Amino acid sequence: MSNLASYAVTSDHSRGRLVQETAPVGRSEFQRDRDRIIHSTAFRRLEYKTQVFVNHEGDLFRTRLTHSLEVAQIGRSIARNLHLNEDLVEAITLAHDLGHTPFGHAGQDALNECMKDYGGFEHNLQSLRVVDVLEERYATFDGLNLCFETREGILKHAAKRTAKKLGDVGARFLENTSPSLEAQLANFADEIAYNNHDVDDGLRSGLLTHEQLDNVTIFSRHLAQIKQQYPALIGRRLTHETIRSMINTLVTDLTQQSILNIKNAKIGTLADVHAAPLLIGFSREIKEQQQELKKFLRDHLYQHYRVVRMSNKAAHNIKRLFSSFNANIKLLPIQYQIKFQQEKQQAIADYIAGMTDRYAIREYRRLFAIELE
């Protein structure tokens, strides 16, 4: 990657892997990371894990897998514009949701509540645990043995109490330094993707309407532009063109503002990046519009009574599974009974977090429906 900026991460100067390995042939270290992530069991499970709508509610709504692919596409596009390491951004974005529970945020909140007396649960930390410990694919190490920079990007935030236990990858939370620009970028690519695609899924489901969204500045402006450009356009094409235009605006603004931030901070090296405040970000105007959209989605989609009903059922599923396993570990599969002897309730959390939506539903039936084994 000869066109990388002087402050971009390069695999030649990576801080390496937890277990030293022979350098890959024909691909970079971060391409190797990406390939390991794509071939992992946790990545395949994302196909049946929820974004907003539970898996069985429809085949056309986003899953964690399609979301991760969309985040990776957006991230690579912005990385190319900023002359950052595209392969590293792709690896981070593909791995960022590996630790997510079934049933989306409702599942995470429920599992966190179940684990409150045992250290809590946070999907971001669980994603790191997946790539560091839980994947079982290689002869000489646990996890995927990813590069430090990929692991740093996966770990978006951590309390100082937790960071102390994470070694080098948690040090920046204790030292108040910034991660790489690639890690910062991956976080914003995630935000761009889920905001806009939740709008799309909300409209597809009928829980949101164009009329409601016309009160949201960023959507209203782009909808008006598309209607002016294509007066006869209606239905799904109108929605897709509007959302496509919104994503383009966000990517362009993020690129331009980030270039300005990097220039103003006089960034010349990767060390400068670590010493500076966060540099990837939107302009003030677009940031405010993004926050307005987030609030709208929270109030009108995530708190819609149909979503709340399903979230309530999902939380009940997770809590009852956890309480049953915790009361009688003999209900767990054998390998998790063995893990429980070493890791206690964390073993239960690992088992539940690794479930897909439909597996969690089936497991619930296995435990509580008398007619099933």
Image (cartoon, grey):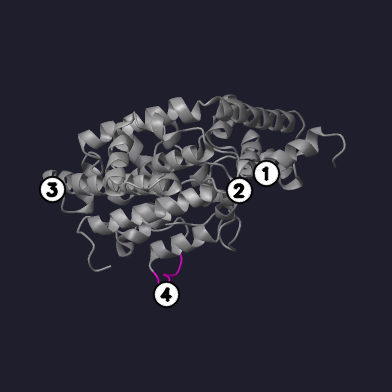
Which region of the structure is painted magenta? 21-27
- The residue labelled by disc 1 is 358
Residue 26 drawn in magenta = yes
Which residue is more in the foreground, 191 or 229? Answer: 229
Q: Is residue 85 above or below residue 341?
A: below
- Mark 4 closeness class: few <14, some 14–19, many ≥20 residues within 10 Å: few
> Of marks 3 and 4, which one's residue comes earlier in the chain?
4
Q: How many marks?
A: 4
Residue, x 24% and y 69% (percent of image)?
2
Whole-angstrom CA distance, mark 4 to mark 2, is: 33 Å
> Of marks 1 and 4, which one's residue comes earlier in the chain?
4
Q: Image check: 82 left or right of 93? A: left
Question: In the image, residue 188 lies at what x, y percent?
Answer: 34, 43
Q: Determine the secondary structure under disc 4.
A: loop
Identity, as a three-letter code, of the amino acid under mark 2: Tyr
Location of the N terminus by quadrant is: bottom left
* Residue 209 image-quadrant placement: top left
Q: Are marks 1 and 3 in contact (CB under 8 Å)?
A: no
Identity, as a three-letter code, of the amino acid under mark 3: Lys
Which residue is more in the foreground, 66 or 100? Answer: 66
Question: In the image, residue 58 lies at what x, y percent?
Answer: 60, 44
What secondary structure characterizes most of the magenta part?
loop
Which residue is more in the foreground, 58 or 188? Answer: 58
Question: In the image, residue 217 lies at what x, y percent?
Answer: 29, 32
Question: In the image, residue 267 lies at what x, y percent?
Answer: 16, 49
Identity, as a three-letter code, of the amino acid under mark 4: Val
- The residue labelled by disc 3 is 263
Q: Image check: 365 left or right of 242? A: right
> Of marks 1 and 3, which one's residue comes earlier in the chain?
3
Q: Is residue 19 above or below residue 188?
A: below
Q: Which mark is residue 25?
A: 4
- The residue labelled by disc 2 is 48
